[in-house]
Amino acid sequence: MAGAAPQTVTALIAAVPETAGSALYGLIDVLAATGNLWEVLTGSGTARPLISPKIVSVSRQPFKCGNAIPVMPDLCCADDPHGSIVILPEIWLRPEESMKGRYPDLTGWVVRCYQRGACLYSACSGAIMLAETGLLSGRPATSHWGYEGLFREQYPDIRFDPVPNLLIADGEGRIVTAGGTTSWHDLALHIISRHCGPAEALHISKVYLLKWHAEGQLPFQPLLRSVNHADSAVKRCEAAIARDFRSRDVLSGAVAASGLPERTLKRRFRQATGATLIEYIQKKRIEEAKRLLEESAIPADEVSAKVGYEEPAFFRKLFKRLTGLTPREYRRLFRPAPGQRSS
């Protein structure tokens, strides 16, 4: 999302009397803070809202959701509101109960949103409402383990899996279900990462102290950070690596650019940057690989060659060690949503 100021993305959050208030308002708070709360608290960058959450219900009339928490919808499904993001939060439902036929207008609206290109996300038992749309038919989905029996009995054509925290149901990543009760944390970070960029997701996780479950923070963190130092020889070396990191001869070129004996450079480089020369080159290459996986459909083996690794197996092993994910997993997690650009 470089260049022009990023567009604010609309997130439409469906709410009904069965909705869990903690998940509903937690999602609103976290998504609305994206792009501005970190900047305000740290005094860095320009605060600008990146996501605008709106509550959608069957009517605009106020009502009370789970635990008598008041809800004032911004929109109703009869308005047929459009948005890039549609979220179905957790609902309060006994495992022996059924949502079948309760909200046909709402589920019909969700289907239309998907047909227009929106990404659909459900948190915990919100997957039951998503199942009501029929869009999960023949696809994998997750929810709280307590609803496994409900899915087996009422939605046998859905491949229910209670294990994952997040489960991507389709090849484009436009239907995502999240698992247990606090899985909306993981879901919010995933949404922010896909629609606003991994850096924004990392900022929000730090501001709200959200715990990362399956992947942890490793895939979201930049591998290289700018380190202020006064060693001019090391600065020349860093510039050479930035220019030639794809080259087989990057190490010898960096040594030559520094004007120092190799052993002396290695010692001073680590003192100045906190990383060894080899670590620095590897991280530079993997950062470029991450960018290519986010922004293109280039096969992983070709990505390996483009960043300077002739052996795809070594590249995959190094990528997994530095990011915590395989290249394929990383691409599925961080591929920008349709209509969005990577930051």
Image (cartoon, rainbow, N blue to C red):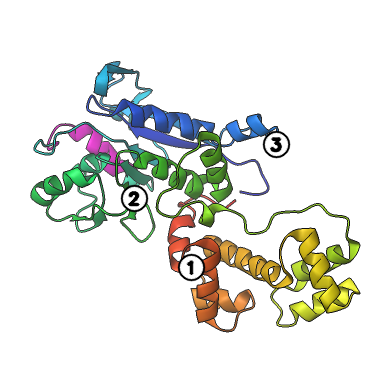
- Where residue 21 sits: x, y (%)? 32, 26
Q: Mark 1 points at which residue?
A: 327
Q: Of tags 2 and 1, which is closer to the observer?
A: 2
Residue 169 in sight here? yes
Residue toward you, 31 or 280: 280
Per the model, the C-alpha gap separating discs 1 and 3 is 31 Å
Residue toward you, 112 or 33: 33
Magenta stretch contains residue 78: no
Per the model, the C-alpha gap separating discs 3 and 2 is 32 Å
Q: Which of marks 3 and 2 is nearer the N terminus?
A: 3
Q: Mark 3 points at which residue?
A: 44
Residue 236 position (above or below residue 133): below
Left or right, 38 with reference to 218: right
Residue 128 position (above or below residue 341): above
Residue 165's label in the rendered image is 2
- Where residue 165 sits: x, y (%)? 34, 50
Tags 1 and 3 touching, CB below 8 Å = no
Query: Hey, what amino acid is under mark 3?
Result: Ser
